[in-house]
Image: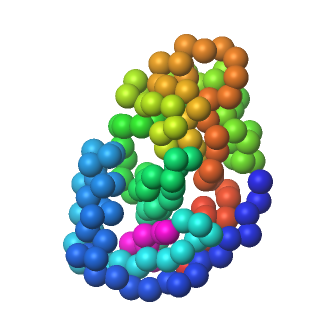
Amino acid sequence: MARDWQIKKRRPVRRKNIAPLLKDLETNLGIDLAVEGAFLEMANYGPWKMVLVNRVPLAVELNDSDGNRVVFLTLRGFLSYPCEQRYVEIDHGAIPFLMNGADCMVAGIHGADENIDAGDLVWVRDKDHKRPIAIGWAVKDGTALVNDTKGKGLKNIHWVGDELWEMEL
């Protein structure tokens, strides 16, 4: 599932210009970004809009299947700002598949935030180390992700080792 997306229209922005985007992100994930004094940039990355903080891709703005705007941290963002909301925990057997861009099956899921609804953007973490591994769209709600034994649980869109992760800025 390789993408040939490139960064385009990269430009510095003032905090006040992206304050609504950052506020949505903080509210949805229950985190405090504290980016005062940081060098902020916006860029287009394929169909996504990306927020860079001190030249690191921190967040993306994309559209869900209904065309609604969704703002979410990148994997590097989750490394910088740990979060306990909208997560899915997987076992070690699923990690190699996710790191190759595969979708996540429910058999590999061992825990999830109960507040997840089908169609939400969620982040995937290792159940032992709690480190981010991937980001994807939930196919089922949080309890079904944990309790079901067959079927797809997440559609993977960003993972450790993809172009966004390996981006040299």
Place of residue 24 in the rendered image (x, y in percent of width and height, measured from the top left): 30, 55
Q: Is residue 133 left or right of residue 42?
A: right
Report the front residue among 132 and 69. Answer: 69
Q: Is residue 51 magenta?
A: yes
Whether residue 148 is visible: yes
- In the rendered image, the quadrant that contains the C terminus is bottom right
> Which residue is at 66% across, 14% downward?
149
> Which residue is at 65% across, 76% downward?
6
Place of residue 157 in the rendered image (x, y in percent of width and height, measured from the top left): 62, 50
For this orientation, the residue located farthest to the front is: 66
- In the rendered image, the quadrant that contains the N terminus is bottom right
Q: Is residue 74 left or right of residue 37?
A: right
Question: Is the residue 51 above or below the residue 100 in the image?
Answer: below
Whether residue 54 is visible: no
Question: Is the residue 22 above or below the residue 115 in the image?
Answer: below
Q: Quadrant of residue 165?
A: bottom right
> Which residue is at 31% across, 71% downward?
18
Report the front residue among 71 and 88. Answer: 71
Which secondary structure is most common in the magenta stretch? strand
Magenta segment: 49-55
Place of residue 121 in the rendered image (x, y in percent of width and height, measured from the top left): 49, 43
The colour scheme used to paint the residues is: rainbow
Q: Is residue 139 left or right of residue 120?
A: right
> Which residue is at 64% across, 44% downward?
156
Place of residue 161 in the rendered image (x, y in percent of width and height, measured from the top left): 67, 57
Question: Is the residue 34 above or below the residue 152 in the image?
Answer: below
Q: Is residue 41 magenta?
A: no
